[in-house]
Image: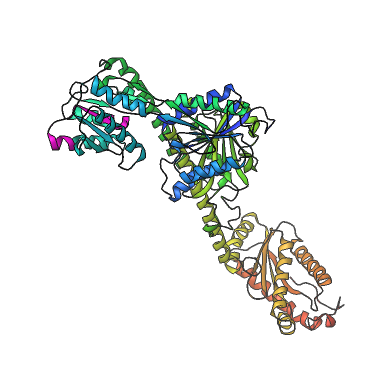
Amino acid sequence: MEKNDAASKTSKKGKNIALVSGGIDDAYLSPFVQAFISKCAEYDFHVLWFQSLANEYKDTPYDKGEINIYDLINFDRVDALVVLAMFMKSEVKTKELIAKAKNKGLPIIIIDGEDDGAYSLSLEYRNAFEKIVRHVITEHNAKNIKFLGGEKGNDVSDERESVFRNVMAEYDLPVTDDNVDYAYFWWASASDAVQRHYDKFGSMPDAFICANDSMAVGVCMKLAELGYEVPKDVIVTGIDGIAEGNTFFPSITTIMCDYTGAGEKAAVRLSEIFSGKLPKVGSETVEGSVLFRESCGCEPINRSATDNLLKHELYNQIDLWNGFSDSIIKISETATGSFSFRETLEKIKLFLTDIWTKECWLCICDNFISENGEDADHYDNYRREGYDPLMKYVIHGLNDKYFDIVNPFRTEEMIPNLDEALDQLGNIMFLPLHFQDRCIGYIGIEFTLTGRNFHILYSLLTNISNVLENARIMHEMRTVLNRLEDMYIKDPMTGLYNRRGFYRSAPDIYERCIAEKKEFMVLSIDLDGLKGINDTFGHQEGDNAIITIAKALEAVSGGKEIVARFGGDEYIAAGMCSDPDDAEDFVKRFREYLDEYNENSGKDYIVEASCGIVKDIPSEGETIDHFIKRSDELMYAQKSTRRKYRGYCRRKDRVYNAPDAPAENK
């Protein structure tokens, strides 16, 4: 007996089982998963279910985004892998997951698939299908029988066709091209096949043997349209045992693949592998059973028995979809108009109640949205495979009522406090959030009976993904627009407002001064000796002097005054005087900043500036330009005087505290 490597792997309360599958087929997938989860609970196994909602895989960007959910699995946090091979849409990804589990020494159970390092449970329907064909021949004396397969070349369809041909040969019944047609596993295509047969022969065969129940339903509908009664005139059978086949009139004779039995058996076999009673490698089959119903004549037609139940279920589904459609419209209306990404998340919280679960986690990748818009024009940087190490935005929902944005967490944990959540819920289902192949994140929910409408889940997650992507685009568009705005109104060298920026912002303060009868102050500042710095030390040092003046003005203002660079070495500061000494204090602190800079700069030149100050309550008809003109005149007057006293701008020629230097004019 093979020793189980994972038996003592962890000391947590229960073992964690990773379950992987794909598609949105409720009829087949839900019975297996529900039975598997229920049986796992008996053994204190916790199920982490990773589910892609793609119904097929064609290697498109969307398909890649869907199967990315499998990359979330942390094989260090699970004790076994269960693969629903018949529902997995990517063979490459399936093999990759199995290889990872093998590398960790985990037990692997494959449902309806094979691998030399796994325990295989095969859903067997071949014997049951043979019984149906024999039953139609022997019990109902059908001789002219037509087989409707799925797409030609499909492995499942080809195998069912092979069974049909073999049984027909047992009874020496001929099978020609007229006895076989293909209907793509779809009711409408099957209906077309019936019409083709009628157009060619003007009559019907004794029976249609269909490769699934959906096609059988389509055959019955077309036969009724052509005036034939089932089963009186034509017998119809299907395979798969979907709910519609049972509620359809007449109910469809079919094969019920034992998905429930397979789910229970998978959990039992895991328990036996963990305990060492069963080797990790092996195989067995789970037999399907034949359900002989109305469409072959083995059950009497009894429409009234199911009418009320069927109508009730249909109206429930209509109400469900109507309510969901309302939610989708609302989420698009409310969330799309959000100003910020966090506001979008706040609005999305309102719609997570449509998931019908006790608890949920909506997790968004760290790099999905850039806070400062740095990646706005770098699409190639977006993650397309796997997940970021950190989930930055996390909405946690509890009991359909409490939703909150919680702290970021490491993605390897899959959800915050994983073990605690699994002890509480027993299972968590993980579904992808993505836009095409751009990874947004994922959602984790508890799988419940009321939450198993995959079509609604699919629509909900697709819409949430679209809303999040739109929010990202809007955020980055605003970032780009803000950049353009800054380029339009900001001086690129200093970061101060340029002339346009000044005249866009200063009038608001000016109007307030008029309305509140407050003094408006304007300071004209001009860098001293820029030409000398450029000529002697180079333009790079001249730029440094320009930037130093800007930094001084920005530091002194602290955002209170509007500060702008009007030209090469000309600056303007403007604001409201809340105190009579505001203007003089501004210049004083400006001078102190420059003195400290010059003392510590280590430069062979000093940075100084001439200032002209005007402050007054604006008069009727007076404009900002009047203030600027007056302050410019005072600044130039001071500049002329400072030239006389200060001389050159080189440190060795600088005159400190010249006794007859003029005071600031105003």
Residue 198 on the magenta segment: yes
The percent position of residue 470, horizontal first and vertical second, equals: 48, 49
Question: Is 158 drawn above or below residue 296 in the view shown?
Answer: below
Position of the C terminus, as image quadrant, is bottom right
Q: Could you say which quadrant of the image residue 155 lies in?
A: top left
Residue 198 is left or right of residue 337, and the answer is left
Height in image: 75 above or below 508?
above
Residue nearest the viewer, comparing 491 with 213: 213
In the image, is residue 93 above or below residue 82? below
Residue 288 placed where, x, y %?
A: 39, 25
Magenta-tinted stretch = 196-216
Image quadrant in which the N terminus is located: top right
> Residue 488, image x and y in percent?
55, 66
The residue at 54%/42% (across/down) is: 97
Residue 376 shows up from this direction: no
User: In the image, is 215 to the left or to the right of 11?
Assistant: left
x and y, in percent, of residue 599 in the image: 84, 71
Task: Determine the residue located farthest toward the left in the rendered image.
Answer: 202
Tell me the quarter of the picture where residue 456 sits: top left
Q: Nearer the viewer, residue 51 or 568?
A: 51
Would residue 160 be visible to someone looking at this image?
yes
Residue 418 in the image: above or below residue 594 = above
Q: How many labels, in total?
A: 0
Is residue 250 toward the left or the right of residue 542 in the image? left
Depth order, front residue of 364/150: 150
